[in-house]
Image (spheres, helix red, strand yellow):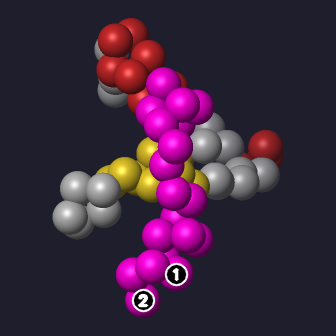
């Protein structure tokens, strides 16, 4: 799951599929508090999906 921020500051939810053979661990860039905030936004934020956002913003 990805938390995307649009140019106008709105946040939307998106999914990303990665083939295991092509995936390399990304270095950590967020501290524990920021990770917790992102997790809460993704799970409880009532966010539009990227597809829903795109339908509303052609």
**Quadrant location of the C terminus in the rendered image:** bottom left
Q: Residue furthest bottom?
A: 58
Q: Which residues are magenta?
A: 40-58
Quadrant of the image containing the N terminus: top right
Relative vertical location of residue 55 with respect to residue 10 in this rendering, above or below:
below
Residue 32 to residue 47: above or below: above
* Proximity of marks 1 and 2: CB atoms separated by less than 8 Å: yes
Percent x, y of residue 9: 23, 56
Quick one: which residue is furthest to the left in this view? 8
Dot 2 falls on a residue whose secondary structure is loop
Q: Which mark is residue 39?
A: none
Image mark for residue 55: 1
Q: Compute the Cα span from label 1 to label 2.
A: 6 Å
- Tell me which residue sits at (71%, 54%) in the image: 17
Q: Is residue 24 positioned above or below 35 on the image?
A: below
Q: Secondary structure at mark 1?
A: helix
Report the magenta stretch's main SS. helix
Res 29 quadrant in image: top left
């Amino acid at each position: 799951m990805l938390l995307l921020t649009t140019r106008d500051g709105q946040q939307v939810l998106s999914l990303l599929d990665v083939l295991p053979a092509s995936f390399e661990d990304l270095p950590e860039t967020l501290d524990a508090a920021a990770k917790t905030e992102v997790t809460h936004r993704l799970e409880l934020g009532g966010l539009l999906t990227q597809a829903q956002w795109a339908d509303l913003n052609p």
